[in-house]
Amino acid sequence: MDIGVLLPTGRAQWGAGDEPRELPAFAVRAEQLGFSSLFVNDSLISPRIEALTMLAALAPTTERVTLGTAALLPFLRRPVQAAQTLASIDLLSGGRLVVAVGAGFPGRFGQPLYTLSEVPWERRFTRLDETVRLWRALWDGASDFHGELLHFDRLPPATTPFRPGGPPVWLGGATPAALARTGRIYDGWLPYPPRPADYATGLTSVRKAAAEAGRPEGAVTPALFVSVRVDRSVEAGRRALGDWAQANYGMPLAELEKIQAVVTGTPEQVADGLARYVDAGARHLVVRLGALDLRGQREQLERVAALLPRLSGV
């Protein structure tokens, strides 16, 4: 089992007096507490520290944790430039990078970003998969690339990642098409289904697609992105997460948990809730802490860390 934490890089997780330069120290504390990975998310909709900038800052300040994106939106960046940046972070971290990617969502969390990036919304999944293929080709030393949407007759020599072939690339998504693409193309799966049963069903589809593509058993890392708050009771946790959901998504918690995995309650209840996803097949949990300032984030970090021995032994 790997258990990681999402860093609070967005302004919605900072209080009035919080200092974002505290984030590297937050990451170091997470490593000291025994978390095995540190993830950051990516957007232009809400103010936040840019994802790859944050990971570059963490590469020399951490020692053993995996550094990951949850999820990177490749369409926000020029594909060749992104390959260079990712290879550089993998080098600086000694091969500790994992790149989970996504194509964005319809509505205010997706389509406006394409407009800002001057990239067509149409055929976004083809563009995403081709971008990943291009990255891998560059990391393997390709001098040209020809896909359906991306064409480069001459590619310059690229920065070589620490690991041969480059960092693992995971996909976030749980539609039938995303499950099939994950099994065929990607190195890991990072969804956030609201029920463990949904996770188990999706993982079965991913593994079936991988087997049909001739990939070996275990080729796809089964991960989970889950929002967590450890509190004195389920009711207290839900009240706090209600404020958190409004601040982060502008929607009530009851609506958010219809589409995303959310676990709250006492330490025992949170451990049991996460264990149900582990029983469904998850082997790398990425925990997003439900707090609205850095002090609260640090408190939640310590509370979740206290559960690590139990969860690691599930």
Image (spheres, rainbow, N blue to C red):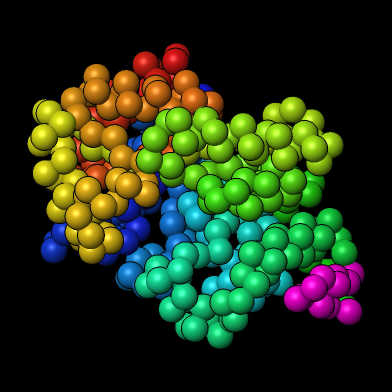
User: In x, y percent, where is residue 260?
Assistant: 37, 46
Q: Is residue 51 left or right of residue 243?
A: right
Q: Is residue 199 visible?
A: yes
User: In x, y percent, where is residue 231?
Assistant: 15, 32
> Does 206 sit above or below residue 247?
above
Dividing the picture into quarters, in which one does residue 127 lie? bottom right
Residue in the picture at 44% in, 53% down: 40
Residue in the picture at 63% in, 53% down: 177
Q: Is residue 17 left or right of residue 26?
A: left
Dividing the picture into quarters, in which one does residue 192 lie? top left
Range covered by the magenta-colored residues: 143-153
Looking at the image, how many numbered discs can be counted on the residues?
A: 0
- Does the magenta portion include 140? no
Work out whether residue 249 or residue 122 is closer to the camera in this orientation and state it: 122
Work out whether residue 62 or residue 111 is closer to the camera in this orientation and state it: 111
Q: Is residue 303 left or right of residue 1?
A: left
